[in-house]
Amino acid sequence: MVMARHWYCSSPVVDGHSLLDAPGFWPAYLADLAEGFAPEAFGSDAGDADAMLDMLHDPSAWPMFTVPLAGGFAIIVHFNSGEEFTTTDYFLTHPDWSQDLVLASDDQDRIGPGLCWPELAALLQAPPGAAGVTDSHARLLLLLPVLGDTAIPEEAVTAVVEALAAQGAPEASEALARQLLQGHPMWGAEHWWFDDDEQSWLCEGDHSPRKVPLGDHLPPQQRAALEACLTPR
């Protein structure tokens, strides 16, 4: 079962933001999604990717990344390394909430997908003055494991190719981009639709937390703020 985020306070969590620019980060981070592609497809050395994978899976230091969103919201990416395996958890947070929302987790319970493409596209620009992962290309690549959408437009492929190139991959990376957009192998791509009554995207996936409206337990004002955060501008 995915660990509630407040339990991480007693765990060896470390700030992972400096790793984003380190050699081998992206092929290591996206290894599950990029099956069949060597680190060189990311413009990285295989040795660097292996070394980075060891760092991400280090039981003594669990990297954490913050993707700041509008309205004080954030998506927190937590690595959780036990003695036998490492999982990655993705939490949607807000300082006014007593409990975070789990968007995705690749632990044994396999929670996901947590975002459709219109939502992810709405999150690529960081709010002014925010701290954390603010580069739009890094934000896209960091959140790709949460995505799982059967209706991926060509603009998404273009966006991922541009993000990969900005991080050092060859410009001709369309095949890799399409692979990365197929969804995490634990839950794949699913059908989404927008419920006008609930004003929320919903997902058909058996393992998705989005089968019910996101934040349906929240007070109306907080729910409206969350909807605005995930709405394309």
Image: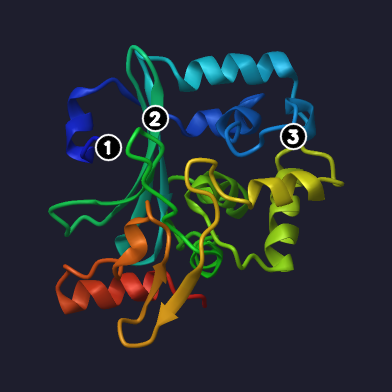
Above/below status of 105 relative to 210: above
Q: Is residue 158 left or right of residue 22?
A: right
Q: Position of residue 128 (x, y in %)?
A: 46, 62
Q: Is residue 150 left or right of residue 116?
A: right
- Locate the N terminus by quadrant: top left
Q: Is residue 131 left or right of residue 190?
A: left
How far apart marks 3 and 1 lie (CA) works out to 30 Å
- Dot 2, how many residues are within 10 Å of its Cα: few (below 14), some (14-19), or many (20+)? some
Secondary structure category for the residue under label 3: helix
Reading the image, the residue beneath label 3 is 42
Residue in the image at 43% along x and 49% along y: 67
Earlier sequence position, callout 2 versus callout 1: 1
Earlier sequence position, callout 2 versus callout 3: 3
Reading the image, the residue beneath label 1 is 2
How far apart marks 2 and 1 lie (CA) works out to 9 Å
Mark 2 in CB contact with mark 1 (< 8 angstroms)? yes
- Dot 1, how many residues are within 10 Å of its Cα: few (below 14), some (14-19), or many (20+)? some
Q: Position of residue 58 (x, y in %)?
A: 42, 15
* 15 or 222: nearer the viewer: 222
Earlier sequence position, callout 3 versus callout 1: 1
Secondary structure category for the residue under label 1: loop
Secondary structure category for the residue under label 2: strand
Above/below status of 50 relative to 113: above
Reading the image, the residue beneath label 2 is 87
Q: Position of residue 193 (x, y in %)?
A: 46, 76
Q: Position of residue 104 (x, y in %)?
A: 38, 47
Q: Image quadrant of residue 82?
A: top left
For badge 3, the amino acid type reads Phe
Residue in the image at 49% along x and 62% along y: 123
For badge 1, the amino acid type reads Val
How far apart marks 2 and 3 lie (CA) works out to 22 Å
Above/below status of 56 relative to 192: above
